[in-house]
Image (spheres, grey):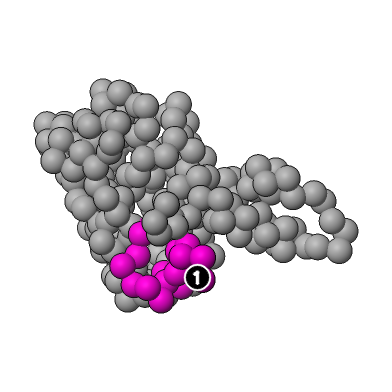
């Protein structure tokens, strides 16, 4: 009897940013990793600069390349419509947003799609995933919270040059990005959390900016 046969396969997700990226390069990178569904997780699915990535335009380009487009910005976007998800400085607090039913429903939709055999990439704008909620909200949630589905999640970020960076690797570089020095009185876990919180303060959406 193969005792490994009962082990669940991991819940696999990719992410990708499009800023300054030509559409043909964007689609080539998706094809390279056999992505067949792009989940748009922008709260506002339009770009002031990169018009080819407007919701209707990118959906059409993806369809022409046999890649499905789905909009999940309502569920998984970083600009919550719930005032209770913001602090006194009017900045969104991801720890609160993660607990919302709407966010959890979005994660469930990703899980269901993955289990149906789709290879899914979460799409947002930022070049570096470390400055984007695709890693700081969704990736962090899936990396650090117990899955309600009983399986692990593997998250790989497609970087601007097309290479991959795992969520774990991304979090390892956050302390250096935020000048967190080695402290003998602080554990690695505490340093990582401090770097994460600093990164959130730098990058998370703030109302009326």
Residue 54 lies, with reference to residue 76, above or below; the image says above
The image shows residue 201 at horizontal and vertical percentages of 56, 56
Q: Up-down: is 77 above or below 120?
A: below
For the question of whether residue 35 can be seen, the reply is yes
Residue that extends furthest to the right in the rendered view of this protein: 184
Give above or below for 11 relative to 166.
below
Where does the magenta region start and end? Answer: 78-98
Q: Residue furthest front?
A: 208
Camera sees residue 168:
no
Q: Which residue corresponds to the image point at 45% horizontal and 47% vertical from the top-left?
A: 132
Res 60 → quadrant: top left
94 falls in the magenta region = yes
Residue receiving disc 1:
87
Majority secondary structure of magenta residues: loop
Residue at the spot 51% in from the left edge and 71% down from the top edge:
88
x and y, in percent, of residue 141 in the image: 47, 63
The residue located at (82%, 51%) in the rendering is 182
Q: Residues within 10 Å of mark 1 (few under 14, many from 20)?
A: few
Q: Vertical placement of 82 versus 190: above or below?
A: below
- Of 82 and 60, which appears nearest the observer? 82
- From the viewer's perspective, is 82 left or right of 139? left
* Identity of the residue drawn at 84% across and 56% down: 183
Q: Quadrant of the N terminus?
A: bottom left
Q: Nearer the viewer, residue 134 or 12?
A: 134
Q: Is residue 99 magenta?
A: no
């Amino acid at each position: 009897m193969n005792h490994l046969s009962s082990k669940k396969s991991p819940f696999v997700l990719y992410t990708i940013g499009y800023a300054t990226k030509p559409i043909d390069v964007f689609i080539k990178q998706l094809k390279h990793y056999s992505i067949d569904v792009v989940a748009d997780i922008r709260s506002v699915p339009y770009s002031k600069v990169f018009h080819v990535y407007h919701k209707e335009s990118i959906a059409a380009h993806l369809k022409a390349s046999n890649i499905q487009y789905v909009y999940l910005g309502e569920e998984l976007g970083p600009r919550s419509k719930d005032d209770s998800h913001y602090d006194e400085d009017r900045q969104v607090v991801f720890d609160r947003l993660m607990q919302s039913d709407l966010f959890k429903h979005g994660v469930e939709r990703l899980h269901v799609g993955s289990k149906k055999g789709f290879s899914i990439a979460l799409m947002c704008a930022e070049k570096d995933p470390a400055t984007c909620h695709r890693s700081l909200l969704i990736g962090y949630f899936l990396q650090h919270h117990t899955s309600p589905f009983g399986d692990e999640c593997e998250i790989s970020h497609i970087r601007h040059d097309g290479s991959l960076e795992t969520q774990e690797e991304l979090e390892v570089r956050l302390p250096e990005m935020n000048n967190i020095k080695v402290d003998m009185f602080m554990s690695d876990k505490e340093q990582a959390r401090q770097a994460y919180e600093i990164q959130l303060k730098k990058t998370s959406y703030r109302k009326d900016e």
